[in-house]
Amino acid sequence: MTVAASFEIEYLQYIGPDGKTVAELPEAFRDPKALLPLFKQMLFVRTFDNKSIKLQRTGKLGTYAASLGHEATHVGIGASMKPEDVFAPSYREYGAQFMRGVKPREVLLYWGGDERGNDFEGPRNDYPWCVPISTQCLMAAGAALSFKLRKQDRIAVACCGDGGSSKTDFYAALNSAGAFKSPLVLCVINNGWAISVPRHAQTGAETLAQKGIAGGLHCLQVDGNDLVAVLEAMRRATERARNGEGGSVIEFMTYRLHDHTTADDATRYRDDAEVKAGWEREPMTRLRTYLTEAGLWSEDEEKAWIEECGKRVDVEINAYLETPVQPVEAMFDHLYADMPADLLEQREQAIAREGRA
């Protein structure tokens, strides 16, 4: 028999769930001190998440998509990009976006129903959140191709979920990046569930990483709860992209510890044993153990830092709550250069119903 092609998918893990190293750490991340500020950022993200969920439960925020359990993946992605790069997120990568300059108050504004929250003050070169899953992958592919054609030292990074990796947009993006050898990094955040559909029910692929092979991209699967593994995977992918070696698909294996959104009830489709197992693998515990055993962290330091995080998040919450609500006609604005007559009529009717005609 003649074999036309064969492949292997490398799996990266350096720090296990118990906080012990399972492989020699990459040279760039052997100093535990380098991980400390990123761990603190992960704690900030979790604090923000907890307070945002409480805001929603008390009617002060609309539907909210928690990032609980994704902190290592998100912060690792954000830490691996340069300011001039382009990021195309889905609607959950707050940890990465905070590191790129998006303000927590903007996140709250968006989930509070105000589209102005999706018009980030910075960075202006990043794409807004994209709720239709995986369409952002095509936007990132286009940006990456433009960087190549202009000979710019920039890359594009897009995030999607395991369900998103089954969309045609994802396949078109990786095919484009492979054909043109564009500097694109596609990050598939595999948390096991495409809302209520388990990973095994929406794809027959043995790994999601291998989907990139068909497009000619470099592929990796990573323990997405291991910050060091995330950082190393991103280091490899971004270096390849910047050196003109083409794009990558990275599958980050993590778990969604919260419901899909606050409008979801995950108990209807997954059992307690699975969630318990997810908590045993979660990213905060292992990195906390690792840093504590390295003498760089303590319970008192964590208590003080969480208190500080709470104060910072409260400032952002107050800024969100104090933002004046837009007038009703704002929903019609900025859609067309010249508004169609029927929408213009609806806009006038909306104003009249508020007694402001």
Image (tube, rainbow, N blue to C red):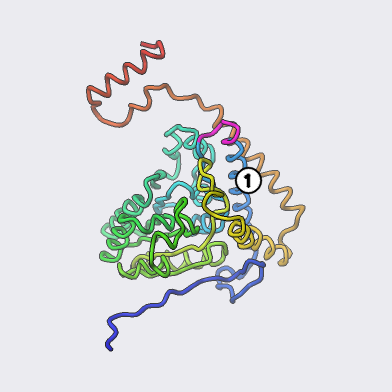
Q: Position of residue 141 (x, y in %)?
A: 32, 56
Can the viewer see residue 283?
no
Classify 225 as above or below 327.
Answer: below
Outermost bottom residue: 1
> Which residue is depicted at the point 38% across and 46% down?
127
How dense is the environment of label 1, judged by Cα within 10 Å: few (below 14), some, or many (20 and up)? some
Decide which of 48, 189 is in the foreground and name it.
Answer: 189
Decide which of 271, 166 is in the foreground and name it.
Answer: 271
- Which quadrant of the figure contains the C terminus? top left
- Which quadrant of the figure contains the N terminus? bottom left
> Which residue is depicted at the point 61% across and 61% down?
277
Q: Is residue 64 magenta?
A: no
Q: Tell me the element at label 1.
A: helix
Q: Amino acid at mark 1?
A: Thr
Q: Is residue 58 magenta?
A: yes
Q: Position of residue 115 (x, y in %)?
A: 42, 34
User: Which quadrant would residue 48 be assigned to in this image?
Assistant: top right
Q: How many marks?
A: 1
Can the viewer see residue 235?
yes
Overall secondary structure of the magenta section:
loop
Q: Position of residue 139 (x, y in %)?
A: 32, 51
Tell me the residue that label 1 is attached to.
47
Q: Position of residue 239 (x, y in %)?
A: 42, 67
Answer left or right for 342 relative to 101: left
Classify 21 as above or below 269.
Answer: below
What's the magenta region?
Answer: 56-62
User: Which quadrant would residue 213 be assigned to in this image?
Assistant: bottom left
Answer left or right for 90 relative to 224: left
Answer left or right for 340 relative to 158: left
